[in-house]
Image: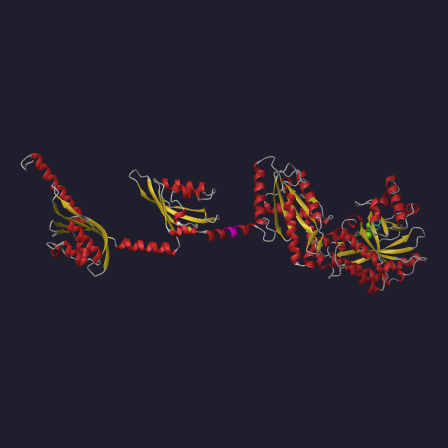
Amino acid sequence: MLKATQPGYTETRVEQMLHLKRLAVVAERSSNAVVLADAERRVVWVNAAFTAITGFSAQESIGERFGILLARGSADPAAFGEFAVAVRQGHGHKREINIRATGGESRWALVDMQPTHDDGGALTGWVLVATDLTNLRAQQQLLSLAVDGAGLGTWQWDVRGGAVQCNDRMLEVIGYQRHQLEMTYQVWNALIHPDDLPPWGAAVRAHLQDSTQSLRMSVRLKHASGRWAWMMFVGAVVDRGADGRALRLAGVAMDVQAQKAMEHELRAAARTDGLTQLPNRSVLLQAIETAIARGRAQPGYQFAVLFMDFDRFKQVNDTLGHSVGDALLRQIASRLQDSLRPGDSLIQTSDFAHLAARIGGDEFVVLLDDIRGDLDAEIVATRLIDVLSIPYMIGAHKVVSSASIGIVTSNHAADDADSVLRDADIAMYEAKRTGRARYVMFEPSMRQQVSASVSLENDLRQALDKQELFVVYQPLVSLRSGAFAGVEALLRWRHPMRGLVSPVEFIPIAEACGLIGVLGQFVLQTACSAFAAMPCSSACAAGDQPTLAVNLSRAQLRQAGLVADVQDALRANGLSPEQLVLEVTESLAAQDALVLSTLHAIRELGVALSLDDFGTGYSSLSCLHELPVNYVKVDRSFVSQAEASAYHRVLIEATIRMAQTLGLYTVAEGIETQSQAELMAALGCDKGQGYLYSKPLEADALVRWVARRGR
Ligand code: C2E
Ligand code: MG
Ligand code: MG
């Protein structure tokens, strides 16, 4: 046994005293209430915090049994009872109790009561430490209210052990009952969408390494029903080991399904054309921009932009209604997609990527990516024109339409997507102007032409009102007798600045901008009334009545109501159908069923048809019999070369023979010399027209011309 005089004993006592002193300072300064009592449970010491929390001063407390102090301060008799039992049994006890504080308000405290013993194990006293939990509890309560109120899921993950905990709300969002799901990290990870798992894993790893920012990410979890449920996880490391490694992650999870669905819809809506579900203009512009950039970076890379517009779409909309127009656009979109699909055997070159978009009205654009050259674009354009011109069945309506395509390839591509699209539009306009249902490759020189024709178009819209349009008449004569045989009405435009503008220039513009209908009616009515007023309209050579020929453009032949207009014009001016001849150009006449049926309807009225400019278009002698015409007009280019070129002469002769066989009359256009007239007569041509006889004349001048000739 150590004695006090022994050096070891003294040292230990001194150390113990020092130790106690330190503890006393800690206890004194602690914000927790500290009570020391002797073995009889009488209070021997309390710290300042005890007084502050309970309101009992040191004087009041010392000497008092702490049980009585506790009983006085306790707001919770049951909890107090537990402490009393533990004390009687000499055990320690620890629990949260509700105490009544100085001011009478109730507070929450964690009371930890422990007995102290001497080395021999005899009870020497009691130590009570009470921690004020009131604020902490209030905060916790507020937090759980917030979590519940916001419908948040909560979760915890034991990083080392792999166990996961969550609240019921969390399970509810993904449709599981608690017993259905094993609460391990592996099982929960397996619920994450395969596309979201790698970024989620990366985000977690990044957060474990650097936890200054909270972990925040939306992922899809597999709902019990099989669908994907979007949830946003926010969390942070809440516990770290002594080595600094994360032990526990905790956080909340929000159901963001509705938000994601809305985001998705908005994003899709901003990129899709609502009617056809094709990508829209902004997607297309982006794709073209990408192609331009790639072209700059990668030599040899080529792309093409095909801009297409549908002939007669506006008419379909106007005459059959918008729902038919919409249905037509949808059918066009699906044909486009079908024919661009790689499996389409007709586009054998379609191993390159493509994008079909609708950028407005009846305007569709296809971007061909990584093509080998212009030829690829031309092959696709040809294929599309074929496919898109097959008649469309919309309910009971059969709609005939065709696409005109403008193509810009990388060779002539401008520096930005908008300009590329504008140039493709220009080429498309050129395709329309030069015959429709065809494609035109863009060339930079087209830009000037277009700006000129745009201003011409604006002027043309006002030309009728301003009475700048008028009709002239060119006489036709019988090549056999030289007698007056009729007239051809030709439209003229006296432009205030440009002077006389040729119909060759403005008729295609009128067709492209939809003015041809009005213009055509004007010519028909003006010519019929002028012709009816001419004294020469009935004064003609024996048997033969002079005829009035009026030109019809291709666009007019496809307009509903043309036949009725013709009938009205005849009736209004007292002309008989036999006096009228309508001229159509050959290439269009054979083109489609709608045109053919109109031609037949005109013939049924008793009005004659004349095939204009024969020899310049696609149709040949062999299909002459397929058209319901009465006259064939040999084109001026043949007549002018007939004397010099045997080839042309032979062709004219063959045409005249074929016409005679079919019972058709022939007219030679553009006869300028006497010898041409004689040659045409010798070849058996019936009528002639040209500067040799007269240039086109205004009505009164023509009347004088006929009168002179008659003399
Ligand atoms: P087209 O129907 O073949 O008309 C004949 C054209 O040849 C007319 O040109 C006429 O002035 C011209 N011409 C007649 N004889 C001679 C000649 O001996 N030598 C030469 N060098 N030319 C001659 P124009 O009036 O400029 O008309 C050109 C085309 O415009 C017409 O060709 C026709 O396709 C179209 N066009 C004219 N008026 C109308 C119209 O009212 N409606 C429609 N749709 N097209 C019209
Ligand atoms: Mg003509
Ligand atoms: Mg002609």
The residue furthest left is: 5
Q: Is residue 153 left or right of residue 241?
A: right
What's the magenta bit mostly, secondary-structure-wise? helix
Q: Quadrant of the N terminus?
A: top left
Is residue 100 something one can see in this rendering?
A: no
Identify the image quadrant of the C terminus: bottom right
Point 58% across, 41% down: residue? 291
* Residue in the foreground of this view, choosing between 393 and 629: 393
> In the displayed structure, does residue 22 sit left or right of residue 253?
left
Count of all numbered marks drawn on residues in the image:
0
Which one is nearer the viewer's eye here, 179 or 354? 179
The image shows residue 62 at horizontal and vertical percentages of 11, 54
- Seen at 80% across and 52% down, the residue is 584
Whole-percent x, y for residue 191 in the image: 44, 44
Provide residue 234's location: percent of width, then percent of height. Answer: 39, 48
Colour scheme used in the picture?
secondary structure
Is residue 250 shown above or below 514?
above
- Please name the residue shown 41% across and 44% down the image: 188
| 51 falls in the magenta region | no
280 sits left or right of 100 in the view: right
Asked whether 266 falls inside the magenta stretch, the response is yes
Q: Can the viewer see residue 453 in this picture?
A: yes
Please give the range of residues in magenta: 263-267
Where does the image place residue 335, in percent across and percent down from the top left? 65, 47
* Residue 337 as seen in the image, left or right of residue 112: right
Q: Quadrant of residue 639?
A: top right
